[in-house]
Amino acid sequence: MCGVNSIRSFFVVLLIGAAFPLGAAPAPKLQVEAPPELEPVARQVRAFEHDDFSETLLLTGMTGFSTPIRVILVPETSPVAQDVPSWVSGYARGNDATIVLFPARVRSYPDRNLRALVHHEVAHVLVAQAARGRPVPRWFNEGVATVAAREWGVEDRARFAMAVIGGKATKASDLDTLFQGSDAEVHRAYALSAAFVRFIQHEYGTLTPAAVLRGVARGLDFNEAFVQATGVPLPRAEYTFFEKDAFWNTWLPFLTSTGALWMAVTILALVAIHRRRVRSRQMIEHWESEDERMGTRLRGRVLHAEDDNTVN
């Protein structure tokens, strides 16, 4: 699998490299600003200039990086950090090509390390540039950035399954609402957004997100750009993903899994044990009732016999 991904990335780099305009580069120039205590982190971030950003370029349709990206590292003691929700590990001002990172928070989902966080925020910058500053839905923006930054792993699948089973979203616009909610809801929104973007690539082509952004850049409304890129209205794609694809990719694998089988066996065993206990309790109560009736009869006979002896 890794070999296939490496070959794919190699050809993507060749294709994009052939299209680089004068002055464009396959990776961004990161101008890092940091206080002295975060200088070790700053050195790590600068080293990411040599990373492979071909996936990000592919998703956004950009042909390279022609301008530097400013990266600001913020410590937790900063007023800026205190004014931002704790689950936010970074954000991008795409139109300004500026990224703000909170290194102490990089272990929060979906960015489990500093490299993934940088790639995520760089993708946001490219989304803004590809759309020429025009707005795109947050679910699309975050989905593209999450897909660009990391492989679809076990944690993503688990969070996707939990989000679907939780029934928190039935259409893409619901995800934008989840992004405004609690930490758990935000994590669901990330998982579903990334899964939806991957679904779009699988159903309508790998380059579909880039085609949507090109449409937005030309002045089309996002929904119009989506139809032009996919040939179907967004609500139809939403229905297929949230109502059908979610079942086949979440519920069905679970229902046919070994875990589900053992869960069913366990439930049946517990039901059988419960019924046995109820029956046993009923039998004991019946026996106690019979013993009580027998005891009452015996006491009656004894008293009657005593009365007879007294009369004699």
Image (cartoon, grey):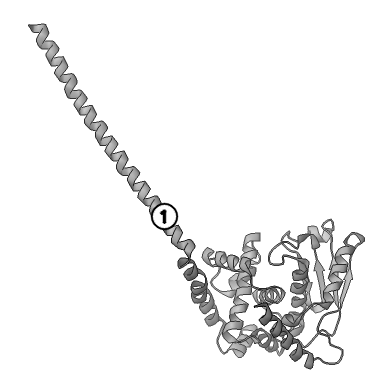
For label 1, count other residues whose C-alpha is less than 10 Å away and answer few (under 14), some (14-19) or many (20+). Answer: few
Q: Residue farthest to the front? A: 3
x, y percentage for residue 12?
Answer: 72, 87
Going 57% across and 66% down the picture, which residue do you hit? Answer: 163
Q: Quickly name the residue at label 1.
A: 267
Instruction: Tell me: 35 left or right of 130.
Output: right
Which of the image's four quarters has the N terminus? Answer: bottom right
Which of the image's four quarters has the C terminus? Answer: top left
Going 47% across and 64% down the picture, which residue do you hit? Answer: 258
Name above or below for residue 142 compared with residue 200: above
Judging from the image, what secondary structure is the residue with disc 1 in? helix
Name the image quarter holding residue 264.
bottom left
Going 67% across and 88% down the picture, which residue do you hit? Answer: 211
Q: Amino acid at mark 1?
A: Ile
Q: Residue farthest to the left? A: 312
Name the image quarter holding residue 28.
bottom right
x, y percentage for residue 46?
Answer: 86, 72
Instruction: Tell me: 240 left or right of 224.
Output: left
Name above or below for residue 281 compared with residue 72: above
Q: 72 or 173: which is nearer to us?
A: 72
Going 89% across and 68% down the picture, which residue do you hit? Answer: 33
Q: 237 or 180: which is nearer to us?
A: 237
In the rendered image, is residue 72 in sight? yes
Q: Residue farthest to the right? A: 36
x, y percentage for residue 10?
Answer: 74, 85
Number of marks in the rendered image: 1
In the rendered image, is residue 177 in sight? no
Q: 30 or 219: which is nearer to us?
A: 30
x, y percentage for residue 115?
Answer: 77, 70
